[in-house]
Structure formats: C-alpha cells, structure tokens
C-alpha cells in the first residue's frame, strides 16, 4: 500500500464588522474559492450570520463553529 497525498484548501477572510450589506458578495466570493475549510474573522452573530450559515450550508459547508459572543455587535471568529 502506498499512502496517497491529500490536501485541504483553507480560506481565511476578515468579514469587516460581520459583513453587513456586503454579505451576499462575500458569500459569492467564499463559495468561488471552493474551500474545504473557511476561517472568518470579525464574525458577528446577527442577521448576516444567519444568511451566511444558510447559504454555506446549502453549498455543503454544514459544520459551523463560532466563538461565543455576548452581544450582536461583538466580533469573533468562526470556522
């Protein structure tokens, strides 16, 4: 048996204050990268996060973990 080399594509992006009105464009960009893993900084638990989760889930990126925050304006990181 010979070991097969595998690779994983990781894409990181700073959403800049949770993405706001740019969230659809950011989602299109992220999906165009065809990543196995996304790391998103300045993530906020708000309406944009709900849209982000839904669209990424529809594209097959169904596992989602975000650092807990205490308010919708507080920024964190999600993977």
Image (tube, rainbow, N blue to C red):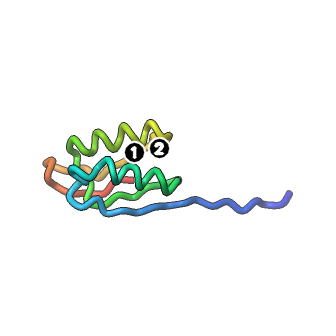
Mark 2: few, some, or many residues within 10 Å (few <14, many ≥20)? some
Q: Which residue is mark 1?
A: 64
Q: Residue at x 37, y 49 (%)?
A: 27
Q: Residue at x 23, y 54 (%)?
A: 18
- Between circles 2 and 1, the one closer to the viewer is 2
Comparing 59 with 70, the one in front is 59
Q: CA distance from mark 2 to mark 1?
A: 8 Å
Toward which corner of the image does residue 58 lie, by quadrant? top left
Q: Residue at x 35, y 58 (%)?
A: 40
Comparing 79 with 51, the one in front is 51
Q: Residue at x 29, y 49 (%)?
A: 23
Mark 1: few, some, or many residues within 10 Å (few <14, many ≥20)? few
Q: Would residue 40 be found to the left or right of residue 1 on screen?
A: left
Comparing 8 with 58, the one in front is 58
Q: Is residue 47 placed above or below 16 in the rendered structure?
A: above
Q: Which mark is residue 34?
A: none
Q: Which residue is mark 2?
A: 61
Q: Would residue 49 be found to the left or right of residue 34 on screen?
A: left
Provide residue 48's location: percent of width, then percent of height: 25, 45
Secondary structure of the residue carrying numbered label 1: loop
Toward which corner of the image does residue 64 lie, by quadrant? top left
Provide residue 19's location: percent of width, then percent of height: 25, 54
Assess whether mark 1 and mark 2 are in contact (beta carbons under 8 angstroms). yes
């Amino acid at each position: 048996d010979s070991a097969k080399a595998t690779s994983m594509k990781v894409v990181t992006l700073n959403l800049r204050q949770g993405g706001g009105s740019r969230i659809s464009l950011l989602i299109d960009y992220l999906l165009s990268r065809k990543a196995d893993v996304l790391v998103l900084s300045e993530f906020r638990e708000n309406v944009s996060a709900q849209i982000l989760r839904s669209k990424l889930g529809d594209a097959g990126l169904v596992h989602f973990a975000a650092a807990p925050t205490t308010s919708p304006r507080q920024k964190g990181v999600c993977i």
